[in-house]
Amino acid sequence: METRRDLLVQAAFRVIAEHGVEAATTRRISAAASMSLASFHYAFESRDELLAELVARGTSDELATFIAPLSPPSPSPGPDSGPVDLGPDDSERRTEGAGTEGAGTGQPAEWVLPADIGDLLKAGLMSYLESIIADPGRESAMITLAQYARRTKGLEHFAQRLYDRYYEIAQTTLEAAAEAMHVQWATPPSHLAPLVVAATDGLTLAYLSTGNREIAERIIDATVTMLRSHLVSP
């Protein structure tokens, strides 16, 4: 059941990115997922339920990209995997396997948080940019879905839900970054969150429209500078 739902969600992202929400009929999405229409209705009760799942899935993936720099890369399963401690000192901001990692395992011997919150925030925004570069169609579909919902009677709640979730993601990221780096925000993260979302919207549209990574990185640097100005001075 979950596999079927996942295939339909991935197909819906592709159809919306390529043809728009209007063209994302249940029949077309089913065909893109190589499924029958009956299979679609077994997995989702309606097209609206699928659209709601797109919002949930898309925003969940975006949260994962933003908070990725706060966590070490997933280690290979095994007894050497150690706990992660986000303490204030360098020695506490790392996780190390017992002994020396074997060559060719692909698992780093050591992971360390950035020493500065600005670097940490930049790492989160760069992680988001990399996700756009890796799968531009997905973010294009999210933008298309928000625009479609905003102008379609009865679907306005999708656009509102999407942006409410974006604000929550930004706030969660700012709070987690401050906690990890043992600093405080002078401005409440809930007030900063819409500014971060405005910046990522601009970054997203700029990259999807031009493919210019340099400009996207300039937007990231300006966003980090702005956020640093809202920290409590030491």
Image (spheres, helix red, strand yellow):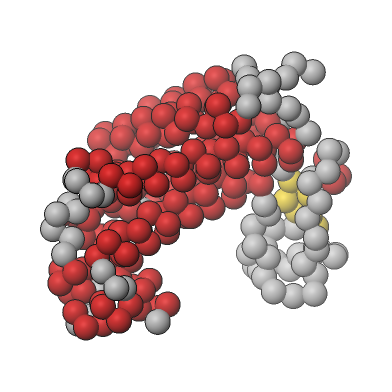
Which quadrant of the figure has residue 78? bottom right
Query: As displayed, is residue 187 above or below residue 66?
Result: above
Viewer-proximal residue among 70 and 24: 24
From the top left corner, tell me how far across and down residue 153 is, in percent.
19, 46
From the top left corner, tell me how far across and down residue 9 is, in percent.
33, 66
Which quadrant of the figure has residue 204? top left
Viewer-proximal residue among 91 and 147: 147
Residue 121 shows up from this direction = no
Query: As displayed, is residue 89 above or below residue 102?
Result: above
Indicate left or right for 145 with 79 as reference: left
For image coordinates 45% across by 42% down, the residue present is 164
For image coordinates 27% across by 61% down, the residue present is 48
From the top left corner, tell me how far across and down residue 142 is, in percent.
32, 48
Which quadrant of the figure has residue 218? top left
Quadrant holding the N terminus: bottom left
Residue occupying the far front of the picture: 154
From the top left corner, tell me how far across and down residue 174 is, in percent.
62, 35
Indicate left or right for 88 with 104 as reference: right
Residue 95 shows up from this direction = yes
Viewer-proximal residue among 187 and 206: 187
For image coordinates 41% across by 29% down, the residue present is 198
Number of callouts in the render? 0
Quadrant holding the C terminus: top right
For image coordinates 71% across by 30% down, the residue present is 116
